[in-house]
């Protein structure tokens, strides 16, 4: 560990009290949720068309080889979306007619023979492959609401940069998936499209903000997805998702747009997929001219990697990591030892305990308040009034949106001593990680401390996302790796983190563990 790390002071008494009060509240709430939901929860219909199970790269190959047409593939995905969406409510807007037209054009191009199979593979690697993205990444001609009622009539007049790059390589956009209000909270729910349900158990959440996207991928309703945030919804839905290194993939066309370089470094649009092999070729396209910085074609020898891991971060107001997730991590460590002779080094990076205040402080956006964005106005009275309206069911805003608006008004002012203190904490963490990881290291860490909670349950577990948010604060690349289903029939998994621009290490580990641990599990088998 880096010698520059300053030891943390003890946790304050009020934080400790809050920690235990919340723990008890969460336990009580769990009992009530169990009673409330009982044995409910729909099962998804099984996947009947084999093409839906294939990796996007394999679908692309078959289209190029004329083993299947793009129209047939698209129609199969459309049937699947229609089959599952009443139970899941993940897909919110389609452009099927335009997509079918583009699929016919793709088939015509293949049949014309004007480009050889090799040329097609090089110039249009995803020709004819249907994909989806979330309703806060712009798709020309479709809504661009970000789940905000005030924006319900906003139509995008051009594609987001990532969508544009993928379409240039032949991929076909089918439509949009659901998000939380202003993409802020980690349950996907808003007052335009409602709530999205987990494909493994509809009583559970899909995460956020790319919750609808994670859901549709797990349900095999789309060949691949474009998300951002990525790992948490990938985790709850048992799929792979890669958050790229900072400043590699363009955020242009994403709403809300980052208003500072710092916030831009937290975000990153990336691939969400059922099969790990799809991430590298998709990232290569999505990163545009920055792709060279990632040296994605350089081979990675897993057995030469240095592996570090940590299970609990001991952050207050946060749930301890579920024993099943800890056991899954230990299994991965054991696998790497047996298969690759790697002795993973267990870490205890104490500064990770401060993940929550670091994130809460650095997220502060002084340019436009949260309330301004979701209500068009701000003020404590305005927010409290909106809360009353919410209780009687006539607010355009979600309860958590209003609460976030209130919380956002407080907090640490940008540039204050406290702000600078947490910025320094973050910088020290970056030092620690950079020293630890070098150019050949990866860090295994839980993506989230529990499997998907019930709907609304995040309200009593509000800070559990600190396992992913702290990695965003550092801008490091990280991949969610699903590791099967836990005893509740819900996906579990871990994330793998690498140093800046070493995304290829994360992806190589993900591909290896996909083969070793089975990766994505079809939801009806849960
Ligand atoms: C969903 O979860 C509930 C409560 O945990 C459980 O009783 C039910 O069997 C689950 N349903 C399915 C389809 O797995």
Image (spheres, helix red, strand yellow):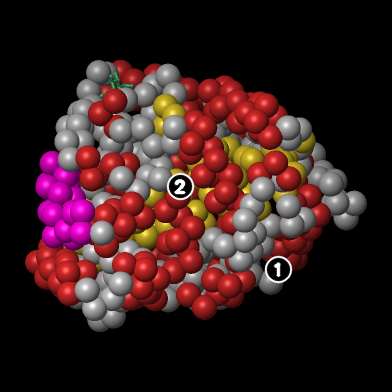
Residue 23 on image: x %, y %: 55, 27
Residue at the extreme bottom of the image, as rendered: 157
Residue closest to the eye, 216 or 220: 220
Q: Nearer the viewer, mark 2 or mark 1?
A: 2
Task: Write down the residue under mark 1.
Answer: 416
Q: Is residue 317 left or right of residue 133?
A: right
Q: Which residues are magenta?
A: 66-85
**Residue 324: image tag:** none
Q: Is residue 83 shown in magenta?
A: yes
The residue at which mark 2 appears reads as 276
Residue drawn at x 27%, y 18% is: 38
How many callouts does the rendering have? 2
- Crowd tier of the residue under label 2, counting other residues whose Cα lies within 10 Å: few below 14, some 14–19, many 20 or above: many
Residue 386 visible: no
Quarter of the figure with the C terminus = top left
Judge whether residue 337 can be spotted in this image. yes
Residue placed at 37% from the left, 60% from the top? 226
Residue at position x 55%, y 40% in the image: 512
Q: Nearer the viewer, residue 286 or 86?
A: 286
In the rendered view, does 42 fall on the left or right side of 409?
left
């Amino acid at each position: 560990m880096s010698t520059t790390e300053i030891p943390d002071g003890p946790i304050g008494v009020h934080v400790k009290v809050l920690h235990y009060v919340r723990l008890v509240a969460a336990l009580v709430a769990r009992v009530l949720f169990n009673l409330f939901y009982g044995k409910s929860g729909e099962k998804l219909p099984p996947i009947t068309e084999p093409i839906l199970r294939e990796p996007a790269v394999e679908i692309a190959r078959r289209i190029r080889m004329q083993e299947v047409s793009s129209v047939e593939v698209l129609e199969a995905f459309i049937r699947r979306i229609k089959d599952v969406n009443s139970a899941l409510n993940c897909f919110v807007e389609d452009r099927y007619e335009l997509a079918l037209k583009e699929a016919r054009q793709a088939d015509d191009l293949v049949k014309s023979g004007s480009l050889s199979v090799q040329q097609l593979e090089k110039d249009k690697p995803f020709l004819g492959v249907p994909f989806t993205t979330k309703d806060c990444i712009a798709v020309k001609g479709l809504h661009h609401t970000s789940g905000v009622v005030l924006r319900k009539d906003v139509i995008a007049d051009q594609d987001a940069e990532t969508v544009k790059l993928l379409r240039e390589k032949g991929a076909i956009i089918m439509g949009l998936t659901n998000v939380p209000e202003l993409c802020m909270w980690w349950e996907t729910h808003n007052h335009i499209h409602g709530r999205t349900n987990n494909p493994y158990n509809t009583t559970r959440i899909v995460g956020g903000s790319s919750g609808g996207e994670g859901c549709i991928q797990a349900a095999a309703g789309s060949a691949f997805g474009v998300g951002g945030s990525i790992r948490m919804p990938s985790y709850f839905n048992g799929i792979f998702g890669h958050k790229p290194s900072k400043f590699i993939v363009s955020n242009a066309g994403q709403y809300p747009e980052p208003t500072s370089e710092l916030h831009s470094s937290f975000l990153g649009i990336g691939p969400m997929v059922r099969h790990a092999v799809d991430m590298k070729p998709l990232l290569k396209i999505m990163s545009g001219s920055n792709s060279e910085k990632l040296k994605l074609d350089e081979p990675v020898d897993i057995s030469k990697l240095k592996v570090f891991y940590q299970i609990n971060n001991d952050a207050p107001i946060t749930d301890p990591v579920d024993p099943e997730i800890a056991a899954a991590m230990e299994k991965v460590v054991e696998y790497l030892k047996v298969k690759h002779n790697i002795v993973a080094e267990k870490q205890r990076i104490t500064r990770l305990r401060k993940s929550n205040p670091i994130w809460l402080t650095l997220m502060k956006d002084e340019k436009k308040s949260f309330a301004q964005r979701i209500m068009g106005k701000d003020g404590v009275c305005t927010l409290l009034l909106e809360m009353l309206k919410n209780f009687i069911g006539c607010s355009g805003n979600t309860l958590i949106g209003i609460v976030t608006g209130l919380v956002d008004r407080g907090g640490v002012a940008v540039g204050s001593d406290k702000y600078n203190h947490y910025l320094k904490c973050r910088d020290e963490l970056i030092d620690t990680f950079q020293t630890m990881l070098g150019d050949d290291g990866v860090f295994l860490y839980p993506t989230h401390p529990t499997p998907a909670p019930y709907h609304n349950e995040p309200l009593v577990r509000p800070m559990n996302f600190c396992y992913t948010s702290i990695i965003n604060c550092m801008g490091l690349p990280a991949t969610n790796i699903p590791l099967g289903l836990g005893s509740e029939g819900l996906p579990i998994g871990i994330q793998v983190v690498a140093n800046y621009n070493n995304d290829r290490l994360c992806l190589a580990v993900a591909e290896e563990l996909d083969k070793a641990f089975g990766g994505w599990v079809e939801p009806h088998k849960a």
